[in-house]
Amino acid sequence: MDPIETKLQALGLSLPQPPSPGASYLPFRFNGSSLVLAGVISAQGGAVTHSGQVGREQTVEAGYEAARVCALNALATIKLALGRLDRVREFTYVSGYVNAVAGFDQSPQVINGASDLFVALYGDAGRHARAAIAVAGLPRNATVEIQVTLLFD
């Protein structure tokens, strides 16, 4: 078994089915030895797992979990693209969007749900540059959406 999937299992987690594009776009695109993923929301099996705004329907802690769901969706897409998760050399950039109330200033704490999982699985190779941005809404009223760019072997 792929050593990254073994680590995932040790954390009590498993990969979902890769999400299907919800509109007219590709789930990923190769650019040399870079892999760029389309945004993935906090949904699994076609159903949104966390919906609504942080600061209204969701807490920062629930937002953190929503970001973790997004990270699992990103990992499922990475496996679809590369065949194995251990082909990732390093994560380079994560854009994180948090559906939040006006004035919300804790987006970094929410997006840590994704970042922390990447670091837990990949160590230093999981560390990345990042943006964590509060927005007024996301597709399907999801609580979090992330986009990932990485290098692979």
Image (tube, rainbow, N blue to C red):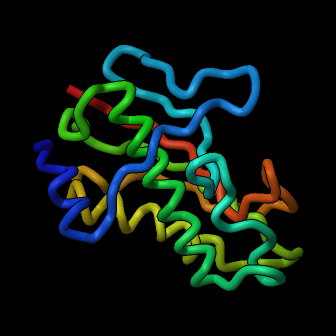
Indicate the quadrant where residue 137 lies: bottom right
Indicate the quadrant where residue 131 lies: bottom right
Q: Is residue 53 above or below residue 128?
A: below
Q: Is residue 34 above or below residue 102?
A: above
In the picture as drawn, the residue positioned furthest to the top comes out as 32
Where residue 66 sits: x, y (%)? 58, 67
Q: Nearer the viewer, residue 7 or 135?
A: 7
Horizontal relation, residue 10 to residue 29: left or right: left
Which residue is drawn at the image coordinates 19% and 50% (left, top)? 4
Which residue is drawn at the image coordinates 56% and 43% (left, top)? 147
Q: Please state, as top left, top right, bottom left or bottom right, where the C terminus lies in the image.
A: top left
Q: Nearer the viewer, residue 129 or 25?
A: 25
Q: Is residue 142 above or below residue 2?
A: below
Q: Please state, as top left, top right, bottom left or bottom right, where the N terminus lies in the image.
A: top left
Where residue 45 sits: x, y (%)? 57, 49
Where residue 22 sits: x, y (%)? 72, 33
Where residue 67 sits: x, y (%)? 55, 64
Q: Nearer the viewer, residue 31 or 37?
A: 37
Which residue is drawn at the image coordinates 80% and 60% (left, top)? 135
Which residue is drawn at the image coordinates 37% and 68% (left, top)? 116
